[in-house]
Image (spheres, rainbow, N blue to C red):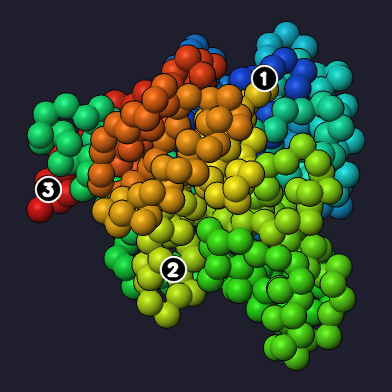
């Protein structure tokens, strides 16, 4: 009876006092009947807040608050449910609204679902027998959010959520997203400088640099200890920490498994070569670090060539650097990678037959979409020639005629024969990264938030 009364109180409190939805997230998702919605992503990326936003959207469209059932299973008062399972939640709800059973659609939001033993069978039964829509999130050392989608075995659709994009940061700041007047351009460029320094984790956007660094360091520590070491029961926790810090310090660079193995051996760790591959898979499962392979038709060639490493947030690696922002080029490359990843592209790097490197070759179903180079500045003639010549060779080999060089501030159009290279500053590219005709299905959401105070701050 105590648990029933508590559940009733929690359900009613959510219905009567919906949490602040915050800045709307630009996530391309669809709600499909009889399929659970699963939000996956890195810790502290805003998954719970996305559930609040979906609840607010439902109410705007006419859903009664009484048709919302929300429970966060990280609440310590619900610890008893870890043994009894989720049935008491359903019983508590329908004891409040018996008339809704089998007659109305109930929207069930289950946050941190992995805390409940046997949740998979319960959710499966709900999808088969109840008239409802289910929304799930989860992230902990017990079960990563990616695995929650896997456990549903075809009964769910998973949608990835990343830290704030630049678009979302502009929404947060209440700023325009189209360059126009000189004032609008200045506001957008100032906002880009702020986002470049702060990164995209929602919790870090409004704090000073010292606090932000400490928060980022805690994120890294928690992800590595709980979602990597503890969850995988690693026998070499110190080696995991040393390896991931090494990868963070090489963010945006090529790495090889053999060199990483030699590095750990030189540090005194007694590990096998397979340990390197295991850790790389663990950190990717945690949505922390991502590997990019060489573009090649041969899988063997992809796997044997050096790979690139990128972090889920472009500002996060700075938390472990002795000198902040010491490699802006790799940081800019990481930023571009994250934007492409948000949009669901298949991403590789490319080497021409003459061994010239192109930072990104991106694909959607149907073939290669675009070749992209990243460079802080093209003012150095040698750098300019290297980036341009690589693209021209890539165009010929991939039968393309157009590509992009993303820079910090420079903008121009380079034409050679029938080829076109658009040199675009990062802030502008982030607002329109691919031609609309190549990405027509990308769903963009609008927001009416405006913060005059933040605009004035950015102009200072």
| Near-viewer residue (91 or 176) | 176
* Residue denoted by label 3: 459
What separation in Å lies between label 3 and label 2 (alpha carbons)? 25 Å
- In terms of sequence position, does the residue under pointer 3 or pointer 1 come before the other? 1
- In terms of sequence position, does the residue under pointer 3 or pointer 2 come before the other? 2
Secondary-structure class at tag 3: helix
Q: Which mark is residue 366?
A: 1
Residue 169, given in percent of the width and then of the height, sits at 35, 42
Residue 120 seen anywhere in this rendered image of the structure: yes
Residue at the image point whose x is 44% and y is 68% from the top: 318
Residue 305, given in percent of the width and then of the height, sits at 73, 56
Q: Quadrant of residue 70?
A: top right
Residue 387, given in percent of the width and then of the height, sits at 43, 47
Tag in front: 3 or 2: 2
In the displayed orientation, state which residue is furthest to the bottom: 268
Secondary-structure class at tag 2: helix
Q: Which mark is residue 318?
A: 2
**Residue 457, placed above or below residue 240:** above
In the displayed orientation, state which residue is furthest to the top: 103
Category of crowding for the residue at label 3, using alpha-carbon neighbours closer than 10 angstroms: few (below 14), some (14–19), many (at least 20):
few
Determine whether, in the image, residue 143 is placed left or right of residue 70: right
Residue at the image point whose x is 10% and y is 53% from the top: 460
């Amino acid at each position: 009876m105590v648990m029933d009364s508590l559940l009733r109180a929690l359900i009613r409190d959510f219905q009567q006092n919906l949490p602040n939805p915050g800045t709307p997230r630009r996530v391309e998702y669809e709600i499909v009947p009889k399929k659970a919605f699963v939000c996956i992503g890195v810790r502290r990326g805003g998954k719970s807040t996305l559930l609040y936003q979906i609840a607010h959207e439902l109410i705007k469209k006419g859903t009664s608050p009484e048709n919302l059932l929300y429970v966060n299973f990280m609440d310590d008062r619900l610890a008893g449910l870890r043994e009894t399972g989720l049935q008491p939640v359903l019983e508590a709800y329908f004891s409040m609204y018996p008339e809704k059973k089998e007659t109305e659609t109930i929207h069930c939001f289950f946050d941190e679902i992995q805390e409940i033993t046997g949740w998979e069978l319960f959710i499966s039964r709900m999808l088969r027998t109840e008239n409802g829509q289910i929304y799930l999130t989860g992230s902990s050392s017990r079960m990563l959010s990616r695995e929650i989608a896997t456990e549903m075995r075809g009964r769910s659709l998973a949608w990835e959520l990343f830290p704030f994009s630049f678009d979302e940061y502009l929404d947060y700041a209440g700023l325009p997203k189209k360059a126009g007047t000189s004032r609008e351009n200045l506001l957008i460029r100032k906002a880009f400088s702020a986002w470049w320094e702060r990164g995209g984790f929602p919790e870090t956007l409004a704090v000073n640099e010292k606090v932000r660094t400490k928060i980022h360091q805690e994120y890294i520590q928690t992800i590595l200890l709980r979602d990597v070491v503890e969850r995988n029961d690693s026998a070499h926790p110190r080696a995991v920490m040393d390896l991931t810090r090494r990868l963070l310090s090489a963010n945006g660079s090529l790495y090889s498994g053999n060199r990483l193995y030699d590095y750990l051996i030189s540090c005194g760790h007694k590990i096998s070569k397979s340990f390197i591959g295991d850790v790389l898979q663990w950190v990717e499962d945690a949505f922390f670090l991502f590997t990019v392979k060489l573009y090649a038709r041969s899988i063997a060639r992809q796997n044997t060539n050096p790979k690139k490493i990128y972090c889920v947030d472009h500002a996060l690696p700075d938390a472990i650097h002795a000198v902040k922002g010491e490699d802006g080029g790799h940081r800019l490359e990481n930023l571009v990678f994250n934007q492409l990843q948000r949009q669901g592209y298949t991403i590789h790097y490319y080497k021409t037959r003459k061994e010239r490197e192109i930072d990104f070759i991106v694909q959607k179903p149907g073939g290669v979409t675009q070749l992209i180079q990243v460079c802080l500045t093209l003012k150095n003639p040698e750098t300019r020639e290297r980036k341009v010549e690589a693209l021209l060779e890539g165009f010929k080999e991939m039968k393309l005629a157009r590509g992009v060089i993303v820079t910090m501030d420079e903008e121009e159009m380079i034409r050679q024969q029938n080829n076109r290279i658009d040199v675009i500053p990062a802030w502008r590219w982030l607002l329109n990264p691919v031609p609309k005709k190549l990405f027509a299905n990308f769903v963009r959401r609008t927001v009416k938030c405006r913060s005059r105070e933040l605009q004035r701050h950015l102009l200072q």
